[in-house]
Image: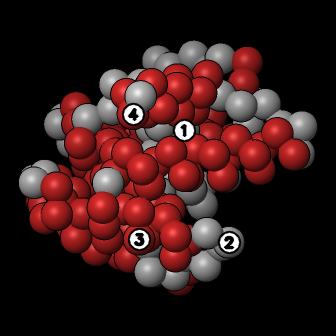
Amino acid sequence: MGDFRYTHSVNVAKEAVTLAKLYGCDEGKAYIAGILHDVTKEIPKDEQLQIIRDGGIILDSVQKNAPKLWHSISGSVYIQTHFGIKDADIINAIRYHTTGRAGMSLLEKIIYTADYTSEERSYPGADIMREKSRKSLEEAMIFSCQFTLQNLSSKEAAIHPDQLFCYNELVLKGK
C-alpha cells in the first residue's frame, strides 16, 4: 500500500469511528472496516479478478466493465481469506463501500460515508457532505449518490444497479 492509500485508509478509519460514536455503531468494527476498506485497491487488476474468482463471485456485466468496483469486491474476499475476518457486517461494509446498496446496515452506511468524507478528501462538495454526515447519514448518502450518478452519467459510464437501489431506497424513505 502506497503512502497516499495508507493515509486515506487511516483517515477513513478515524472518520468511521467518529461517525460510529455519533450514530451508536460498534467503534471497533468501524475502525477495522475503515482501515481495510481499500486493502486490495493497489493490487494489479488481474490479481483482483483472481481473488474475486477464488471467492466464488461472478461479476455482473456492469462490474466486469468497471474495474474501479473490483477492489471493494476483492477486498471483501481478501479480508476473509488472509485475515480470517468472518463478521458479515465488516465484510459487507467493505464490499459495498463504493456502490452502496439497498438495505445497508449502519456500519455499511458509515464506511460508505467515511470514504467520501475522510480528512484528505477535497473534491467539490466534500465539505458539504461532511456537514451533512454530522446531521444525517442518509442525507449525506443521498448527496454522495447524486454526485456519483451525475459524474458517471456525464461520462456515459454504466451505473451499477446497487447504486441506483441505494439511492432509490434513501429517497423513498425520506418521503
For label 1, the crowd category at 10 Å Cα-Cα, with few meaning under 14, some 14 to 19 and many 20 or more, is many
Distance in Å between CA atoms under marks 4 and 2:
24 Å
Quadrant showing the C terminus: top left
Q: In the rendered structure, which disc, 1 or 2, sits on the residue that comes first in sequence?
A: 1
Report the front residue among 7 and 158.
Answer: 158
153 to 120, vertically: above or below: above
Q: Viewer-nearest of labels 4 and 2?
A: 4
Per the image, the residue denoted by label 2 is 124
Per the image, the residue denoted by label 3 is 131
Res 118 seen here: yes
For label 4, the crowd category at 10 Å Cα-Cα, with few meaning under 14, some 14 to 19 and many 20 or more, is few
Q: Position of residue 148 (x, y in %)?
A: 66, 48
Q: Residue at x 58, y 44 (%)?
A: 145
The secondary element bearing badge 2 is classed as: loop
Distance in Å between CA atoms under marks 1 and 2:
19 Å
Per the image, the residue denoted by label 1 is 99
Distance in Å between CA atoms under marks 4 and 3:
18 Å
Total residue callouts? 4
Instruction: Answer with the quarter of the image where residue 155 lies.
Output: top right
Q: In the rendered structure, which disc, 4 or 3, sits on the residue that comes first in sequence?
A: 3
Q: Viewer-nearest of labels 1 and 3?
A: 3
Instruction: Answer with the quarter of the image where residue 84 lies.
Output: top left
Q: Residue at x 44, y 54 (%)?
A: 140
Residue 34 horizontal side relative to residue 107, left or right: right
The secondary element bearing badge 3 is classed as: helix
147 to 174, vertically: above or below: below
For label 3, the crowd category at 10 Å Cα-Cα, with few meaning under 14, some 14 to 19 and many 20 or more, is some
89 to 109, vertically: above or below: above
